[in-house]
Amino acid sequence: MTPLGHAISPRTPGKGFVLIYVAAILLLLVGLVMVGAREIRKEGRLSAALQDQLVARNTLLAAATLVKARMEMLHVPQGESASDLLGLASRATEGVMRDHADLAVSFEDADLRPDANGLTVEEWARLLGAYGLVEPYAIDMARRLEQTRRDQGGFESVSDIEGDYRLPRLLRLGDESDNQYPPLARLLSVSGGGKRLHVDYSPLPLFVSLLGATSEQIERLRDARKSRRLKVADAELIFGGSARAVCHDGEPTRIRVRLAALLAPVVAEFEVSVAQGRLRTGTSRVQNTSP
């Protein structure tokens, strides 16, 4: 018992407990500072990346505007046709590209990318199957894409489609080891293109989608391409008479000019055609190509 007249004094914590408490607070503060510094560095990297993309975008638009102006000043000689498009376009970009060492230019037949807004549910399903999606899921996905197209009143860009995570990864990103299986952005367009296939150059999955080609027919086409320059008659032998209505083997009537930034995932594209002895260029489209 406590003697009368003596108060009970509370027990004070020992020095060891105080030191542990102070150390814990210091560790917490250090952790908060480190997390804050890491977030600041992360935001700084993101800001730098966005700034690089903005600079690349503006550079691409400026270069595309200059190239288009040079092209529209060119005259197509009498008697020459759209078969000269590639040569004329290449000549128009030479000076511009020398002044932009951070850009690359390429050309392709604009007819090689059918319009995504024109694909039927069946054609979508076959295309998805060519990229590895099994039939029940391919049909369901094709119907979803068709419904999305209707709800939106038409796809405005390929990015409206490729952002869907349910698409096969191969279709979204392509196969780097086989350029015959390009990503969606290099496979389809939304620029009013038709459903034409070039016997020599069109990607193989498009023959599956538009012609219903079997795996054996695709292999025959792949082997034939390795041996010679193909004609529409070759396509008829491989795919049957329906190939004549879809396939062609001539020079492009429209080409797509593609300017790419080497240091940022940004590209600019526009189309070129011949009208009344002059080159005519379409609207420039700039997009981010990062996955």
Image: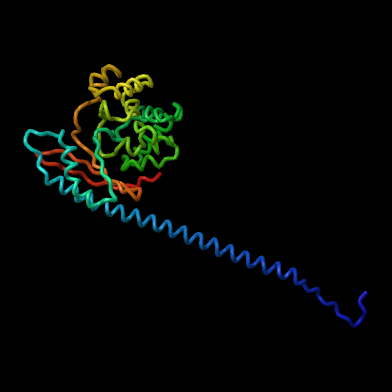
Give the vertical position of 8 relative to 104 (above or below).
below
- Residue at x-position 24% and y-position 35%: 109
Numbered label tally: 0
Give the vertical position of 8 relative to 53 (above or below).
below
Q: Indicate left or right for 163 with 26 as reference.
A: left
What x and y, as percent, mark residue 258?
Answer: 26, 43
Q: Indicate left or right for 104 with 276 as reference.
A: right
Q: Nearer the viewer, residue 281 or 229?
A: 229
Residue farthest toward the left in the current orientation of the protein: 78
- Residue at x-position 25% and y-position 32%: 194
What x and y, as percent, mark residue 95?
Answer: 18, 49
- Residue at x-position 21% and y-position 37%: 255
Quarter the C terminus occupies = top left
Query: Which quarter of the figure has residue 117?
Result: top left
What x and y, as percent, mark residue 278?
Answer: 11, 41
- Residue at x-position 36% and y-position 42%: 160
Give the vertical position of 11 relative to 211 (above or below).
below
What x and y, as percent, mark residue 145?
Answer: 38, 36
Query: Which quarter of the figure has residue 133?
Result: top left
Give the vertical position of 279 relative to 50 (above or below).
above
Quarter the N terminus occupies = bottom right
